[in-house]
Image (cartoon, rainbow, N blue to C red):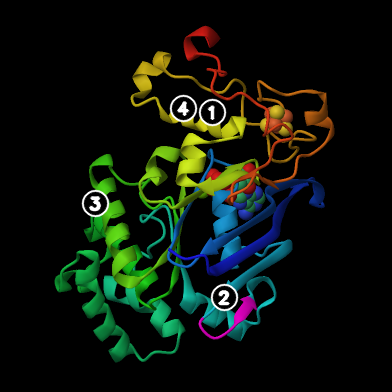
Amino acid sequence: MSDTPILQVEHLSKYFPVQRGLFRKTVAHVKAVDDVTFTVHKGECLGLVGESGCGKTTLARCLLRLVEPDKGRIVLHGEQQALDIVSASRKEMLDVRRQMQIIFQDPFSSLDPRWRVTDVVAEPLIAQRIGRAEAARRVLELLPTVGLGAHFADRFPHELSGGERQRVSIARALIVSPPLVVADEPVSALDVSVRSQIINLLLDLQSQMNLTYIFIAHDLSIVKHISHRIAVMYLGQLVELGTTRQVFEQYRHPYTKALLASALIPDPTRRDEGYVLEGEVPSPINPPSGCHFSTRCPFAQERCSAEEPALRDMGDGHWVRCHFAEELDLSEEIFAPVAALG
Ligand SMILES: Nc1ncnc2c1ncn2[C@@H]1O[C@H](COP(=O)(O)OP(=O)(O)O)[C@@H](O)[C@H]1O
Ligand code: SF4
Ligand SMILES: [Mg+2]
């Protein structure tokens, strides 16, 4: 891993309009991604975690302009030049897609059922104007790398297991040899029994092909072993960013503590031994004023709902979005035991 940036995301925002009535009047906005800033370094795996609905997928899709961002910059430090993806032309986007690819969460809906594996995997090459015969040759060469025999090339997605489908999605992402891969919860739709195989495959491929990953998950336990650094997201914003050690052992944001506490519950039927957050996740349509976490934070004070905290550098590349990050004592069991909540 190096300190050389491959991707710089600056003040990125995406608000979806909420429309009502006959004339589809915009009555509010879902702040799915709200002023997100971070850098990805060459060769690292950056984990991105947060509860369902906090904006992870929207952020991932913005990075590839599968969703158009409203504000901010996404600078890709490419092989030849640096390029702002947000303002890139159609031709420049073709180059971006050769350098950055995405693996989607659900291999059941992300693969077209009418296409054979060979066509699915070859598609990004065809988009790069590579001829069909050459594309088919490269697909056959790549399949064993993702653990699939050559005989899979002629199969249809419905003839494959979940794990095999996700291997196809991985091959499809890697066929253009992109240095940067965004993996959006790549194992959460799979059976528990095959999850570690796919994670291990992604790890092997990273070292073999010198890949940089942005790896999205909804809980911290899954990213712990694979990430060099971790970004924690809450209601569209990053609330903590640091090395895996800083986030797991020297966390400074109460929400990170809460996520860690809930990750300690190994078996959902025995929740009484764990600790959870009180209250529902507020709606991203009208996030709480000031600190977005103020309605659930046990440390909230008057200033928290009045003034929005900035993501601040605490030193050594450890960033935290909390007014009181320096002084909070997070060693206490601050979150109510589930049993006490009834
Ligand atoms: N196309 C869309 N139109 C309107 N709202 C959307 C759209 N996509 C996502 N959202 C909303 O944006 C928020 C973030 O969603 P998402 O990025 O899917 O979160 P996550 O991946 O963390 O579960 C949610 O409130 C979701 O309902
Ligand atoms: S700013 Fe206030 S409400 Fe937000 S996390 Fe810090 S203490 Fe809690
Ligand atoms: Mg998602």
As drawn, the label of residue 197 is 3
User: Which portion, as a residue range, is magenta?
Assistant: 79-83
Residue 263 locus on image (x, y percent): 43, 30
For the residues labelled 1 and 2, the Cα–Cα distance comes to: 35 Å
75 over 298 or under it: above or below: below
Residue that appears at 54% across and 79% down: 78
Q: Are marks 1 and 2 in contact (CB under 8 Å)?
A: no
- Place residue 81 in its image quadrant: bottom right
In the rendered structure, which disc, 1 or 2, sits on the residue that comes first in sequence?
A: 2
Are discs 1 and 3 less than 8 Å apart at CB? no
Q: Residue at x 61, y 65 (%)?
A: 8
Q: Amino acid at mark 4?
A: Ser
Residue assigned mark 1 = 258
Whether ligand 3 has any atom under 8 Å from the Cβ at mark 3 is answered as no
| Residue identifier under label 4 | 262
Front-most of 137 and 325?
325
Q: Is residue 81 magenta?
A: yes
Query: Label 1 vs label 4: CA separation?
Result: 6 Å
